[in-house]
Structures are given as structure tokens and as C-alpha cells.
């Protein structure tokens, strides 16, 4: 596995050394966003993801969590406030280059159905123009990491895999170019409960090994508490509470949070 | 039937020559329609506001009776005149709609999750088009090309009326002298061509869809 410093040098990122302290990998500063003339989807949102941290955005549908995620890799643009990635305003960045530095995983994985599993995993390194031998080595390594050895699965098409296996390939593809941060939108949402549970367990393991910062969106509070170092509860574009799962459970900030978390308390407290 | 067989055998050289002309006219017009229709179809997916009027216009053009369109084209400079060039221009017009429409719907029917992940991974719009959207739309685009080819093979027989050559020559001659064998000598090879093109392109289409 490549070290983080090497990966950052290759990607031209020097944000860690420049500051001397672990600055935020991703940061929202007072961000507002609305679609057309409707009510704001994001209403003065401020959040940050520290290095190596997993921050989960959770909330009912329509709370703006997916919108927030898409502002980071500029699939959407915001109206006011600032979104920072690696310490730089994303609006000053070339979206294409920015996206190649941010791994992106979506529900159902969005794999390219006409490419083999291996080709899917190799997509970003190839876009970045890595040497063929390096691309090959990296895809072998990642398919091994997600439990789909290239010898057995590399040449298969996505439709020949189960939902859980496809999601694994999606994660491997997002990790391929060693991005310092990962954006995940309901990554395990389409899986059955058993596959979901084992993916969550493995995700924690991959994340620890790759030392990633992760911003993950889910509507499933149980998943949020399982995976998140910190959890942000969103409602109608506003952060109701942000904290560790324990903080949120022990001292909910308001009635909304209390009600939202109530059902899950027996399930997450051991 | 053996009467027709003898008739055909005696004229085999002429029939083969005219079939060759026919194939050339259809190939040239279909290729041109692909070269124009596919990029135009892609462009329409990028400018959805133009899609409706452009597709509507192409639809209307499709309804012009072919003999009339051949006639309209004759006096025009560049594409006009008597001969194969005018016929090819007219056939391009007819072949354009299925290719244009299928390219448009083919690109739009690519799974949005796949398109979003292509963008999210950092593909440029051009890379996304060439590596993801076009390959995934290809079976649908090809279905359009197949329809266009079959239509063109039939319409090309009419083009003999403006001196374009092809199998229509036999049909027109047969009609003029009321000889059903001559008509069949043009019609049967044309029908076989259409069937062969349909089957061949259908096969390629199914290959690609897999």
C-alpha cells in the first residue's frame, strides 16, 4: 500500500504540511443552496470533516444531505458560503481534477456495465494516466482488499455479481487512485440487511487501513451510529446536532433529535 | 416459376450490376445519415430545449412523399440534378430521422447512476460520451441504423425515376411495358437485400446488447 504522503504528493496536495496541523479535509462554511425559487435546501450549513475522520450526514429525505455531498465534488454548485476541500475553495478548482481527488461511491455503485470488474476499478488511475503496470498492481491490490480476488472476479461483468459484490467493486473503484477523502451517498442502501451489515463491518476495516477522511450520507440512523466518528443530524437544510454517537444519544440537542433517535436507542446501546 | 428462373438467368449480369448500384446508393446514404445523425442526436441531448423542435421537424420531413422529394431536389444546386447524387441526398433525409431519434433516446436512456458516477469519478464530458454514453447507447443507435437501412433499400427503388440507377430501373421498365417478370427481377432482389440487411444488422445489435 502506498503511504498517504506519497499519494498526496502524486496528487499535488500539500495541505497537511502547509498547516502543520490536521486541518479539515472537507469543510462547509455557512453554505446556502436552493433549487429554483423553492425553500432553501441547505440553510447556512457549517460542518467539517477532519483528517481520517468519518462524518455521517443523516436525516429524513429532503433534508439536504445528498445536496451537501454533491457540492464537495461540484456535481452541484452552491449560492453562498464556502465549501473547502483540502483547504481550498472548491469553486476555484477545476471540477475534473477535483473529482479525481475525491473517491465517490453511490447507491447501486453505478458501475459501468460494459466494462469488466477490473476495468471499472482501474477507471480513475487510467484517467490520471498512471503507468499500465501500476494500474494493474493497484487494481489487484484493491480487489484483494474488498474480497474479490482479481483472478476470480477481475474479468467478470458487473451484472454477474451480487448486489453486495457490486458495491464492493464500487468502493474499490473509488479508492483506486488513493484519494485522501471519500464521498459516499447511501453506499449500502440497496443491500439486504445481512450484506449491509457485513459491508459496514468491512468498510470500517478498509477505512482504518487506508486512513481516509469520509463524508457519508445515509437515511439510516443505525448505520450512521455504527460507522460515524461523528454524526450530523440534518433537517430541512439545517444541522440540528453534530457530535459523536454517544453525545447525540446521551444529550440530544432538541426534540427533533430526540424523536429522530428514539427508535434506535435500544438497537445501538449495547 | 421456371419461366421466371430462365428470365432471371438470362439477365443475371444486368441484375447483378443494378443490385451493386442499389447497394452503393444505400450504403452511401446510410453512412452519410450516420455521420450527420449521430452527432446531431448527441448534440440534442446536450440542448434539450432544441430536441423537440428538431425531432418534430425531422418527423415532418419524413412525411413528404418520396417521389415529390426527389422532384424537389432536382433543381437544387450541389445536391440536385439527375442521377445518383440527388437520390443519395433524398435518402439521407429519410434515413436521418430514425438514426437521430434513436441516438437521442439511446443516450438519454443510459442509467443516470452510471452517468453520475462517470462524472463523479472525474471524466470530462467528452470522455464520458466516448467511454460510457455512446457504448451503452450503441445497441439503440444501431437499431436506428437498421431501420434506416431497410427504409433506404425500399426507397432507393423509387430513385430510379430520377435516373439514379439501381434495381428500380427494372421495376420502372417492367411497369412501362407491363412485364411482371421484369418487375419481379427488380423487386425480389430488393426485398432480399432488405431482409439480409435487417437480419445482419439485427445480429450485430444482439451481439452488442449482450
Image: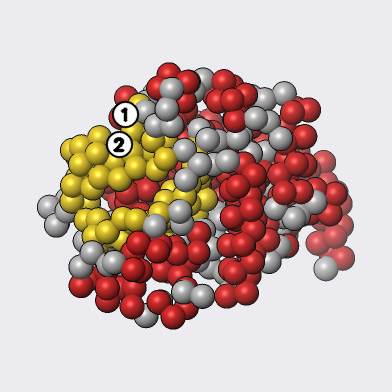
The quarter of the picture where the N terminus of chain B appears is bottom right
The quarter of the picture where the C terminus of chain B appears is bottom right
Q: Position of residue A257 (x, y in %)?
A: 27, 69
Which of these two is toward me, A104 or B164? A104
> Could you say which quadrant of the image residue A177 lies in?
top right
User: Left of A24 or right of it: where is B50?
Assistant: left
User: Left of A102 or right of it: where is B202?
Assistant: right
Q: Position of residue B202 (x, y in %)?
A: 69, 57
Chain ID at mark 2: A
- Report the residue at 40% width, 77% height from top: A265
Q: Are marks 1 and 2 in contact (CB under 8 Å)?
A: yes
Using the rendered image, report if marks 1 and 2 lie on a common chain.
yes
User: Left of B179 or right of it: where is B163?
Assistant: left
- Report the residue at 20% width, 41% height from top: A30
For residue A89, which numbered disc appears in the image? Answer: 1
Determine which residue is flagged by label 2: A83
Scheme by which the image is coloured: secondary structure
Which of these two is toward me, A195 or A115? A195
Which of these two is toward me, A133 or A46? A46
Is residue A227 at least partly visible in the picture?
yes
Mark 1: few/some/many CA within 10 Å (<14, 14-19, 20+): some
User: Left of A181 or right of it: where is A127?
Assistant: right
State the SS at label 1: strand
Q: Is residue A133 above or below residue A106?
A: above
Chain ID at mark 1: A
Q: Position of residue A136 (x, y in %)?
A: 77, 35
Is residue A72 at least partly visible in the picture?
no
Which of these two is toward me, B120 or A6? A6
Among numbered discs 1 and 2, the one appearing first in the sequence: 2
State the SS at label 2: strand
Q: Position of residue B56 (x, y in %)?
A: 32, 52
> Could you say which quadrant of the image residue B75 lies in?
top left
Amino acid at each position: 500500500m502506498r503511504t498517504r504522503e506519497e499519494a498526496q504528493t502524486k496528487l499535488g496536495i500539500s495541505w497537511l504540511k502547509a498547516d502543520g496541523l490536521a486541518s479539515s479535509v472537507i469543510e462547509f462554511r455557512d453554505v446556502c443552496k436552493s433549487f429554483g425559487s423553492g425553500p432553501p435546501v441547505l440553510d447556512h450549513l457549517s460542518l467539517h470533516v477532519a483528517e481520517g475522520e468519518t462524518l455521517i450526514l443523516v436525516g429524513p429525505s429532503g433534508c439536504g444531505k445528498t445536496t451537501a455531498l454533491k457540492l464537495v465534488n461540484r456535481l452541484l454548485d452552491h449560492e453562498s458560503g464556502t465549501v473547502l476541500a483540502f483547504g481550498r475553495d472548491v469553486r476555484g478548482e477545476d471540477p475534473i481534477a477535483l473529482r479525481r481527488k475525491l473517491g465517490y461511491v453511490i447507491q447501486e455503485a453505478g458501475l459501468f456495465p460494459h466494462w469488466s470488474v477490473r476495468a471499472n476499478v482501474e477507471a480513475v488511475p487510467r484517467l490520471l494516466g498512471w503507468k499500465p503496470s501500476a494500474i494493474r498492481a493497484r487494481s489487484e491490490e484493491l480487489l484483494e482488499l474488498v474480497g474479490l480476488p482479481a483472478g476470480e472476479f477481475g474479468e467478470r461483468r458487473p451484472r454477474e455479481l451480487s448486489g453486495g459484490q457490486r458495491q464492493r467493486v464500487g468502493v474499490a473503484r473509488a479508492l483506486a487512485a488513493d484519494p485522501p477523502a471519500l464521498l459516499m451517498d447511501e453506499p449500502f442502501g440497496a443491500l439486504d440487511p445481512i450484506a449491509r451489515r457485513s459491508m459496514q463491518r468491512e468498510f470500517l476495516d478498509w477505512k482504518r487501513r487506508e486512513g481516509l477522511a469520509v463524508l457519508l450520507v445515509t437515511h439510516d440512523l443505525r448505520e450512521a451510529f455504527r460507522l460515524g466518528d461523528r454524526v450530523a443530524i440534518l433537517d430541512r437544510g439545517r444541522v440540528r446536532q453534530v457530535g459523536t454517537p454517544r453525545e447525540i444519544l446521551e444529550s440530544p440537542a432538541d426534540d427533533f433529535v430526540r424523536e429522530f433517535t428514539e427508535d434506535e436507542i435500544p438497537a445501538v446501546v449495547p | 416459376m421456371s419461366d421466371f428462373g430462365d428470365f432471371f438467368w438470362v439477365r443475371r449480369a444486368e441484375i447483378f450490376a443494378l443490385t451493386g448500384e442499389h447497394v452503393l446508393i444505400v450504403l452511401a446514404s446510410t453512412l452519410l445519415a450516420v455521420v450527420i445523425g449521430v452527432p446531431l442526436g448527441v448534440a440534442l441531448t446536450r440542448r434539450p430545449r432544441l430536441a423537440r423542435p428538431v425531432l418534430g421537424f425531422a418527423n415532418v420531413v419524413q412525411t413528404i412523399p418520396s417521389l415529390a422529394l426527389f422532384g424537389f431536389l432536382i433543381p437544387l444546386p450541389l445536391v440536385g440534378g439527375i442521377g445518383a447524387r440527388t437520390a443519395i441526398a433524398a435518402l439521407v433525409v429519410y434515413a436521418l430521422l430514425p438514426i437521430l431519434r434513436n441516438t437521442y433516446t439511446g443516450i438519454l436512456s443510459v442509467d443516470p447512476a452510471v452517468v453520475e458516477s462517470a462524472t463523479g469519478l472525474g471524466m470530462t464530458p467528452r470522455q464520458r460520451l466516448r467511454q460510457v454514453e455512446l457504448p451503452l447507447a450503441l445497441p439503440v443507435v444501431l437499431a436506428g441504423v437498421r431501420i434506416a437501412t431497410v427504409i433506404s433499400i425500399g426507397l432507393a427503388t423509387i430513385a430510379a425515376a430520377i435516373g439514379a440507377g439501381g434495381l428500380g430501373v427494372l421495376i420502372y421498365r417492367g411497369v412501362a411495358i407491363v412485364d411482371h417478370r421484369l418487375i419481379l427481377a427488380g423487386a425480389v432482389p430488393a426485398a432480399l437485400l432488405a431482409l439480409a440487411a435487417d437480419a445482419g444488422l439485427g445480429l450485430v445489435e444482439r451481439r452488442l446488447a449482450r
